[in-house]
Image (cartoon, rainbow, N blue to C red):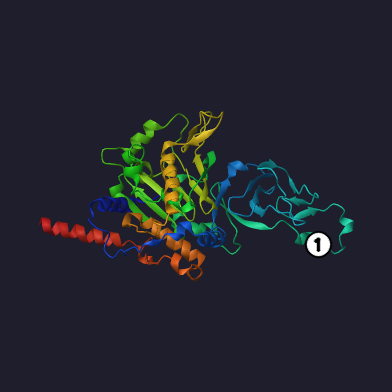
């Protein structure tokens, strides 16, 4: 949990953000971003190869494979993989590809077995990936070494009960990838939250168009006048950029709104408060971008990530996830979707999500025109520019064509824990005090 001094500093910075008349002193002018970053097949291919193959990606929750022997298929980032709760209690990831002739080892989305068996020729693997059974073993050479033919592993690590995977065998550990977020997320009980809801929807826009709608509050008064705007004061929004491309948005409610009171009033039976959540998580909108494709407001009721999976240059699969403390015998909470009257037991996106996604599809259509040439961003949209810098950094600047590259103008002095804004705020406060004397 944040200590009192940190909470006080962030609260003061939010108030300062509301009073400033220009970007902070020394904050760089953000060059226009090339339009092709949203429309270029070449850039999309670079993202797939360098970003989604080398980042830690949300894969699921332990509730989906709760017991030893349980497994689940996962195929949101290219290669199909299987995530297994091993008989030894360890969660592992493997390429879902038999080492014989490439058939899938698992063909169901969920299952439970002490062995994984390819249905093509019944090659059999233990839950630790080792090959233990080959029919007609006599037809293979006598020196055929089963120990070298196990399922190929995929890096798989957990933060609390949340499962992440990474295709890069040389990737830094997940805890290092999270960096400062790991400490800040301790209060949200990742080790106790359960999976309450997980639904997917197809969107007709580039994944960044969909994601970036959740990375700034500049649009909130205009797109969300009746849903988000009454709960978020966009003028006092405070952006923080972290190492490895992550970021945080912290915004208080309008002065006439008590966010903690609203949450308590709106909470149906079964919604359990996470008592360890501190003041800012209870009273403000505290939303994190976990690079590259997770955005989540965290509160004293939910960990509800929105996860954006590119399926083509102009299409995206949006996963809407709700995680919460045990709800007992009450219906499982679902923050992002509502019942769909047109189909039994179906779900549709909530009004807040629809407001963003529907406009995102219109944006993509407009982006395809010759009139879309570049993207000028404001200081309030700096999280988006920083996100694009991180994309290029993972791709490798030399790999990005000149006409698609962004200039890395946001330097390390603007990345946590450096806070040039604090010094400016203190200077202005000192100047105001002297003027008052």
* Residue 258 position in % (x across, y down): 30, 37
Where 281 falls versus 388 (above or below)?
above
- Where does the image place residue 366, in percent across and percent down from the top left? 42, 50
Q: Residue lying furthest right in this view?
A: 138
Residue furthest to the left in view is 437
Residue 301 position by quadrant: top left
Q: Secondary structure at mark 1?
A: loop
Q: Which residue is mark 1?
A: 145
Toward the viewer: 417 or 381? 381
- Which part of the image, by quadrant, shows the C terminus? bottom left
Asked whether 128 or 253 is in front, the reply is 253
Task: Please tell me whether residue 233 is drawn above or below residue 270 in the rendered image.
Answer: below
Please tell me in which quadrant of the rendered image residue 102 appears.
bottom right
Residue 50 is at least partly visible in this image? yes
Note whether 328 is above or below 403 in the view shown: above
Q: Residue at x 68, y 49 (%)?
A: 88
Q: Position of residue 253 (x, y in %)?
A: 31, 42
Say left or right for 298 vs 328. left
Above or below, 290 relative to 410: above
Q: At 51% across and 31% down in the image, what residue appears?
A: 340
Q: Quadrant of residue 278?
A: top left
255 horizontally vs 133: left or right: left
């Amino acid at each position: 949990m944040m200590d009192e001094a940190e909470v006080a500093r962030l609260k003061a910075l939010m108030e300062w953000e509301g009073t400033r008349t220009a970007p902070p002193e020394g904050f760089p002018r953000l060059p226009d971003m090339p339009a092709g970053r949203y429309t270029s097949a070449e850039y999309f291919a670079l993202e797939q190869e360098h970003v989604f193959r080398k980042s830690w990606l949300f894969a699921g929750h332990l509730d989906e494979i709760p017991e030893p022997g349980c497994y689940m298929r996962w195929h949101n980032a290219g290669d199909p993989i299987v995530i297994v709760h091993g008989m030894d209690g360890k969660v592992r990831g493997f390429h879902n590809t038999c080492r014989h002739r490439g058939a899938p080892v698992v063909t169901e989305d969920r299952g439970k077995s002490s062995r994984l068996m390819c249905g093509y020729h019944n090659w059999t693997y233990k839950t630790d990936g080792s090959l233990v059974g080959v029919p007609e073993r006599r037809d293979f050479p006598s020196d055929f070494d089963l120990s070298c033919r196990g399922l190929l592993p995929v890096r798989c690590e957990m933060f609390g009960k949340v499962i992440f995977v990474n295709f890069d065998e040389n990737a830094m550990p997940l805890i290092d990838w999270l960096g400062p977020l790991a400490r800040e997320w301790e209060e949200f009980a990742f080790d106790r939250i359960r999976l309450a809801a997980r639904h997917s929807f197809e969107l007709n826009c580039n994944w960044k168009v969909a994601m970036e709608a959740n990375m700034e509050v500049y649009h909130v008064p205009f797109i969300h006048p009746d849903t988000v705007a009454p709960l978020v004061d966009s003028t006092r929004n405070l952006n923080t950029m972290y190492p490895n491309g992550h970021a945080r948005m912290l915004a208080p409610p309008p002065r006439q709104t008590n966010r903690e009171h609203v949450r308590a009033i709106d909470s149906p039976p079964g919604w359990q408060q996470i008592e360890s959540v501190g003041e800012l998580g209870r009273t403000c909108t505290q939303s994190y971008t976990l690079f590259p494709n997770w955005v989540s407001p965290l509160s004293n009721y939910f960990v509800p990530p929105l996860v954006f999976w590119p399926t083509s240059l102009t299409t995206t699969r949006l996963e809407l996830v709700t995680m919460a403390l045990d709800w007992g015998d009450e219906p499982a909470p679902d923050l992002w979707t509502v019942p769909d009257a047109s189909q039994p037991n179906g779900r549709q996106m909530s009004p807040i999500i629809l407001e963003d996604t529907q406009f995102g599809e219109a944006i993509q259509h407009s982006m395809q025109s010759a009139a879309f040439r570049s993207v000028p961003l404001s200081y309030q949209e700096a999280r988006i520019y920083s996100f694009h810098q991180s994309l290029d950094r993972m791709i490798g600047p030399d790999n990005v064509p000149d006409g698609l590259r962004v200039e890395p103008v946001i330097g390390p002095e603007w990345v946590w824990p450096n806070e040039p804004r604090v010094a400016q705020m203190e200077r202005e406060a000192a100047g105001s005090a002297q003027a008052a004397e």
